[in-house]
Image: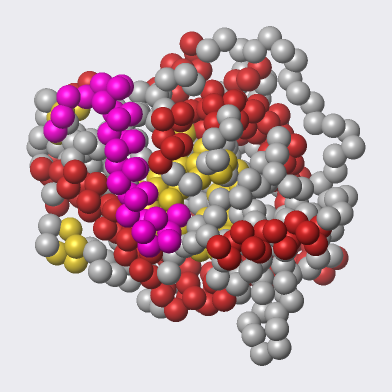
Amino acid sequence: MKVCHRLITLLTLSCLAFATPACSQSPDETQTSTTAAKGAPPVWGDLPNDRPSCIRGIHLTSWYTGTKKGRARFEKLLADTEINTVVIDIKESEGDVYIPGVKLDGKPNFVNAMPDIKEYIKYLKDRGIYVIARQTIFHDNKLAREKPEWAIRSSSPIPKAAEKGYRADVWVDKKGSGWADGYNPEVWKYNIDIAEKAGELGFQEVQFDYVRFPSDGQTKLCVYSKPHSSATAVKALEDFLERAHTKLKAQGVGLSIDVFGLVGSSTGDLGIGQKLDRLIGHVDAISPMMYPSHYYAGEFGIKDPNSSPYETIYHSIRDTKRVVGNHPVELRPWLQDFSLGVKYDGKKIRDQIDAAADLGVNEWLLWNPACRYTRGGLMPPMNEEEKAEEAKRAAEEKKEKAAKAEKEGTTEKAEKPVEHKPAEKTVLEKKTTEKKPAEKKPVLKKPVEKKTTEKKTPPKKG
């Protein structure tokens, strides 16, 4: 049965430039790491230069990816664990672009954080690693400063705009960040051009983040190039994604999007244009940002979601699957591998992965703002030597943080995610949570027999 499953998978992937298999098998059945042929590079992931049967990935910043030290760390994870995918930043909310060939207002917009990115993408793909480019879209400080006519305007000047170096009529959120106008076709073209450049470099998929309208700050002051309402916002995002999907599909490149974790539990668009049932028809995969630390107490009837990762992820995915229904879009949630208020160890990482798997969702991505991932949460389980190495690394990192904190005259605080995943809930999310009554059903308990490391160990990679 297992051999037949693999044969079918290979035939399917060989026929399609970008296949989106229903990843509903068990982790053991989809572990397809292969021994490299003589003289060929070692295979860390699934099939060289192809899409894995189930994507299991980590996020990497462009700066981390561009360093030898960073590569040495995450390549060990790729070689030793079930991780077969990397999501690399090519454009963040500051607006800098980390791949060459892009222009903004006629001037090159390129920061060379990854000098050999084209060669390195090939290096990873040859070893069976699936490579995704992460690109922020409408949250773009640089565009709002250098091309203000493409930015969201303000009906009344916001003092923080001038303080942050924007033109006086540009709208900024509560942190003083500028946003591109989500209705402007020139903004669409600019971002699609970047995505196509990523495809030309060899990225196999582009993941759009901040595909939404702003939610924080004085949003009533926002002035757009077209009439703005919930209906027009949803339609604008649909049209933008459809255009991008068509362009990338012609290159054989996939398209996925990040969405708020609550979109699957909402019947509306959360005031940001993200109405899940309307967006899924224009992408290959969706990645709801399901971080337990970002849910309020009482959400889903759970007293403390941050301390209950299994239950929180289970309820979030259950709601999202109800919206997705039988649609072929791949559900690939972002899961939490950082500590914010509650220490997240290997067990808490695995609890999230198990919750997803218990609902038939075996694709996932892990987020850590510092790109430091918890080996103890990944399969196969660590041996004694790896446990000692992990403990040593953790002790060194703790010592480095303490030294840095002492030098800066501050006390060590919990590491917060970067802006991609806001550490504090937005006003919009607070309102949504307050309006939605807590479920009366008892909180789902994780089955007693579930263990973090007592699963059948899949074959070692390479």
Q: Position of residue 346 (x, y in %)?
A: 73, 49
**Display coloring:** secondary structure
20 and 437: which one is in front?
20
- Residue in the picture at 30% in, 46% down: 243
The C terminus sits in image quarter:
bottom right
- Residue in the picture at 71% in, 35% down: 359
**Where is 131 relative to 287, above or below?**
below
In the visual, does 336 lie left or right of 224?
Answer: right
Q: Quadrant of residue 237?
A: top left
Q: Main secondary structure of the magenta part?
A: helix
Tell me which segment is drawn in magenta. Answer: 225-254
425 and 16: which one is in front?
16
The N terminus sits in image quarter:
bottom right
**Where is 280 relative to 223, above or below?**
below
- Residue in the picture at 17% in, 24% down: 227
Q: Position of residue 384 (x, y in %)?
A: 85, 65
Queried whether the magenta region covers residue 380, the answer comes back as no
- Residue in the picture at 57% in, 10% down: 437
In the visual, does 298 lie left or right of 176?
Answer: right
**Where is 74 relative to 436, above or below?**
below
Q: Quadrant of residue 275?
A: top left
In the visual, does 198 lie left or right of 61?
Answer: left
